[in-house]
């Protein structure tokens, strides 16, 4: 009963997203070529194929997170989406950020999410995902967001640099510890406060007598 | 739960020390010779020679020094020994053993038969390999009904009783049979020629014989019954 | 008493069997070394461009096939690395069983081939022919997918793991960080396999494994920071280039804190690889086999492949970070450059040196692999609270201390390099002395039992 509906939702959702992105990027590709970027311009290379694969992985993973009824499958979709984003970072020659993405989001956040799912009760029947999908409002919101993203992508005068394997680790290190030292330390201080706060909230009250 | 600094340092020191000694002990094991005996095909010496001397393997009867006293048969708690002693038809003064069967499939290797033997004829050996396709082939027959062996008379004052080397007889016996030999269809051998005189005797002993016959029936097979009857009136 | 025979192989072994085993024992490492030395350095843009220009006669920048040559080179390198991992994993499975047997006064598998060397092939074939069972109540898709996550985590590590001067598939600028990151795929695979099996043993094993791996990533990361601080780079090859060929040029000896960090890293890696004494996730006495209890056949084999290939990774990472990697004593970067020659393709001597560097790296790694196996059969499994205590109360503070000490040490070393040199020699001498004392202790332990002596016969 539910499977056809789910399949339909998946198919329609993915097709709509891919279709809109495809049409818009095809229409906007001359603009991109003029702006110096070159997707869809020139011959279709292996790198392009990998890029589209990674992009599909990201979008498909995100769709799986939203549409899957099984929460573990949702977590797996999150894995795909995060991995896809890491791949996109690689395409942007941001190697450190890509690896940090894998390290923090897959090695940390996703594992914690999976861990939390498995430590909850009734793990045998995890059908507690969000089943209500407001198609109209969701579609409207998506359209607005898509338009916004596209406008930002094509209208903002990006500081475009030639792609290349320039290592980014050392510049990031210098930026964090020289130029932006105070914000960096403040951010870590906030994280430390959060940690201590979490411990205080979570621990048992042993002094109360 | 909280520990002092000295305990903390002590824990680290203990870990390092026990690690040091443990690793050294296991490394010394690597350098030693494994004690594994690769039975059965990669033995430097026969496995029987590796076993301890008082190993309880198959029972062996040295028929040359068996006195036919049947002490072992009586001592056996599970009746796996079956002995028949008769008078030699040719020489009435000489008693002969016509049957000396040990069911090694039934034997529990307790050693109780070895202890009462006056001459040390019955002994445990270190032999244990006698895989047989038919379990009946595990009945070792030490006496030949056709050629029964005479009982041994202990010579008074003899310094020792000469015994065949322990295990040699069992080895001969084992060498004679192949593992897939066809098993006999009955357990004890039927005497080829039933002794003619006994059938006359039973009628007077018919009454006590009937309950007595029930007792041997518990023994491996019904066949012994005719052989037992001649003995019944004797006591 | 018959004569004891110490001959190896035993007299009477079939000549064909001896030949086959010795052939395999020589051919497999040769094949692996050849694969690594000749395929992996080719994944290098200048070399491939030279190949296209001079052998194929095209201009690399404009030719359509350039990308296909690149892709083919990457594909071949991937195959080479995976073959390497699979075969070393297999051989380690045999080797570990033999060493375990010796430690327990047994002999171990010694029937398939001489000394049982071909046992791992027999085991692999047996596992491949077994039925690929999926439990009826399991989540079939995730159950089938989980082993591939584990294998992917192991294989991705090999991308940045060096094995020689030019033998690394991709000398990533974030190499060691990347290795730490992709290891998390193994955790995802373990969690998914534990959950999808729908068995309480599997789930408990998975949760234990995850808690353990996530905890021990902290001391491992702190320990890795020590050589990173000393080298000033995250690249695995850069870390090795910052060290030297002679032992006193290794990071392990150049800084007292680095020696501590080495042990922290080694312990953390044991825990992350679920090796004894941290194998709570697969504790046989409590959890059947932990997260892979329900697996059989090929997928079961994949878990074991990863476990033993992890042995190589443990050794290789520690060697890269602390023990000088592939550096050949007395061969400097200038020597490498001059041996390579000015041509677009390296000269013959360069390839020979590659083999030497691979050999040096392999010897160091195999030594650590031996230590891992040796620890496994020495220490009993620890309790989960002891494991967490060790991590958070001992290793993490020690890791922080080592890191802070290294910061100070680097300042001292820049200010007065002689201090570092003297320390390296002193620590090296101390290590030699400790090793000597250890061997003496072992000799004493051997002779503690009467009539015992060092005897390596009875294979």
Image (cartoon, coloured by chain):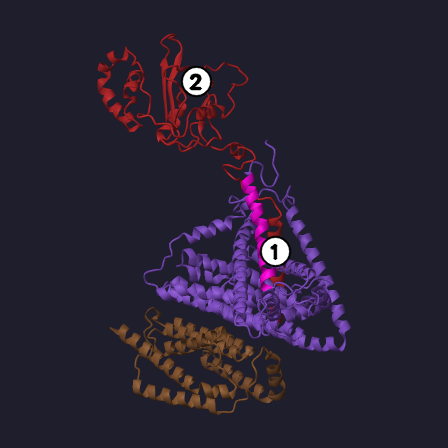
Chain colours: A brown, B red, C purple
Compare marks 1 and 2 and give the one earlier in the sequence: 1
Determine which residue is flagged by label 2.
B67
What number is the disc on residue B23? Answer: 1
Foreground residue, C383 or C185? C185
Q: Secondary structure at mark 1?
A: helix
Is C338 covered by the magenta stretch? Answer: no
Residue C197 at x, y percent in the picture: 38, 63
Q: Say which residue appears at 61% left-offset and 37% top-offset.
A: C5
Q: Nearer the viewer, mark 1 or mark 2?
A: 1
Foreground residue, B212 or C61? C61
Name the magenta segment's main secondary structure. Answer: helix
Q: Secondary structure at mark 2?
A: loop
In this rendering, the answer to whether B2 lies above or below C102 is below
Q: Is residue C419 left or right of residue C451?
A: right
In this rendering, the answer to whether A205 lies above or below B88 is below
Q: Magenta stretch? A: C15-40
Marks 1/2 in contact by CB < 8 Å: the verdict is no
Foreground residue, C217 or A100? A100
Do marks 1 and 2 share a chain? yes
Check the picture and name the quadrant holding the N terminus of chain C: top right
Residue A126 at x, y percent in the picture: 33, 72
Check the picture and name the quadrant holding the C terminus of chain C: top right
Q: Say which residue appears at 69% left-offset and 52% top-offset.
A: C440
Res. C386 in view: no
Residue C324 sits in quarter:
bottom right
Q: Say which residue appears at 29% left-offset and 16% top-offset.
A: B230
Residue B183 sits in quarter:
top left
Foreground residue, C152 or C30? C30
Q: Say which residue appears at 24% left-offset and 20% top-offset.
A: B208
């Amino acid at each position: 009963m539910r499977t056809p509906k789910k399949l339909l939702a998946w198919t329609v959702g993915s097709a709509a997203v891919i279709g809109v992105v495809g049409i818009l990027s095809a229409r906007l590709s001359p603009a991109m070529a003029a702006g110096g970027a070159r997707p869809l311009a020139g011959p279709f290379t292996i790198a392009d194929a990998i890029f589209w694969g990674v992009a599909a992985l990201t979008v498909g993973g995100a769709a799986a997170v939203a549409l899957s009824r099984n929460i573990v499958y949702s977590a797996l979709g999150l894995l795909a989406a995060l991995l896809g984003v890491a791949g996109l970072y690689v395409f942007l020659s941001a190697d450190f950020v890509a690896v940090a993405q894998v390290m923090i989001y897959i090695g940390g956040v996703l594992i914690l999410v999976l861990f939390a799912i498995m430590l909850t009760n009734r793990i045998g029947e995890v059908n507690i995902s969000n089943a209500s999908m407001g198609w109209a409002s969701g579609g409207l919101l998506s359209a607005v967001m898509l338009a916004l993203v596209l406008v930002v992508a094509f209208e903002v005068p990006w500081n475009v640099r030639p792609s290349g394997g320039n290592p980014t680790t050392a510049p990031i290190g210098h930026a964090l510890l020289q130029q932006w030292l105070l914000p960096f330390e403040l951010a870590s201080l906030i994280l430390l406060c959060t940690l201590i706060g979490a411990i205080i909230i979570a621990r048992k009250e042993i002094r109360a007598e | 739960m909280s520990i002092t600094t000295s305990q903390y340092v002590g824990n680290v020191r203990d870990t390092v020390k026990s690690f040091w000694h443990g690793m050294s002990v296991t490394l010394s094991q690597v350098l030693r010779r494994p004690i594994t005996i690769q039975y059965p095909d990669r033995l430097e010496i026969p496995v029987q020679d590796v076993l301890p001397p008082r190993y309880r393997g198959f029972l062996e009867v040295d028929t040359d020094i068996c006195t036919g006293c049947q002490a072992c048969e009586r001592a056996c708690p599970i009746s796996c020994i079956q002995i028949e002693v008769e008078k030699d038809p040719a020489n009435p003064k000489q008693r002969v053993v016509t049957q000396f069967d040990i069911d090694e499939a039934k034997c529990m290797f307790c050693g109780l038969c070895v202890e009462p033997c006056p001459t040390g004829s019955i002994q445990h050996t270190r032999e244990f390999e006698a895989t047989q396709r038919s379990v009946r082939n595990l009945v070792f027959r030490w006496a030949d009904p056709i050629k029964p062996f005479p009982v041994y008379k202990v010579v008074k004052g003899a310094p020792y009783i000469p015994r065949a080397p322990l295990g040699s007889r069992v080895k001969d016996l084992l060498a004679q049979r192949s593992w897939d030999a066809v098993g006999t269809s009955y357990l004890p051998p039927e005497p080829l020629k039933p002794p003619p005189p006994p059938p006359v005797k039973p009628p007077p002993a018919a009454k006590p014989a009937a309950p007595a016959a029930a007792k041997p029936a518990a023994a491996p097979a019904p066949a012994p019954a005719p052989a037992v009857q001649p003995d019944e009136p004797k006591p | 008493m018959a004569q004891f025979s110490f001959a190896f192989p035993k007299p009477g072994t079939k000549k064909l069997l001896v030949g086959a085993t010795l052939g395999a024992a020589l051919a497999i490492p040769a094949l692996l070394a050849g694969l690594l030395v000749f395929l992996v350095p080719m994944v290098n843009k200048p070399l491939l461009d030279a190949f296209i220009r001079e052998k194929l006669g095209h201009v690399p920048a404009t030719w359509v096939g350039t990308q296909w040559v690149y892709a083919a080179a990457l594909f071949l390198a991937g195959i080479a690395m995976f073959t390497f991992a699979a075969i070393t994993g297999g051989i380690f499975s045999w080797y570990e069983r033999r060493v375990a047997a010796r430690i327990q006064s047994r002999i171990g598998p010694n029937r398939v081939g001489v000394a049982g060397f071909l046992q791992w092939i027999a085991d692999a074939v047996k596992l491949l022919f077994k039925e690929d069972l999926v439990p009826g109540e399991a989540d079939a898709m995730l159950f089938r997918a989980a082993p591939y996550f584990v294998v992917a985590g192991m294989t991705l590590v090999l991308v940045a793991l060096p094995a020689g001067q030019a033998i690394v598939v991709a000398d990533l600028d974030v190499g060691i960080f990347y290795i730490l990151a992709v290891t998390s795929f193994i955790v995802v695979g373990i969690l998914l396999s534990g959950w999808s099996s729908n068995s309480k043993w599997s789930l408990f094993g998975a949760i234990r494994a995850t808690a353990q791996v996530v905890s021990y990533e902290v001391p491992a990361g702190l320990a890795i920071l020590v050589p990173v601080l000393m080298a000033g780079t995250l690249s695995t090859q850069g870390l090795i280039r910052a060290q030297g060929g002679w032992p006193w040029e290794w990071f392990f000896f150049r800084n007292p804190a680095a020696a501590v960090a080495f042990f922290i890293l080694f312990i953390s890696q044991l825990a992350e690889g679920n090796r004894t004494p941290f194998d709570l996730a697969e504790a046989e006495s409590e959890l059947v086999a932990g997260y892979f209890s329900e697996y059989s056949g090929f997928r079961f084999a994949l878990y074991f492949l990863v476990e033993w290939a992890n042995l190589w990774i443990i050794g290789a990472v520690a060697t890269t970070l602390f023990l000088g990697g592939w550096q050949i004593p007395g061969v400097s970067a200038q020597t490498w450059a001059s041996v390579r020659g000015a041509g677009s393709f390296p000269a013959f001597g360069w390839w020979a040196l590659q083999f030497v560097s691979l050999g040096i790296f392999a010897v160091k790694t195999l030594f650590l692999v031996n230590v891992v196996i040796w620890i496994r059969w020495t220490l009993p499994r620890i309790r989960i609270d002891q494991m967490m205590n060790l991590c958070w109360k001992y290793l993490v503070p020690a890791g922080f201390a080592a890191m802070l000490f290294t910061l100070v040490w680097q300042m001292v070393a820049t200010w007065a390099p002689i201090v570092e040199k003297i320390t390296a020699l002193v620590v090296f001498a101390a290590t030699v002395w400790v090793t000597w004392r250890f061997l003496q202790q072992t000799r004493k332990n051997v002779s503690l039992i009467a009539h015992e002596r060092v005897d390596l016969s009875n294979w």
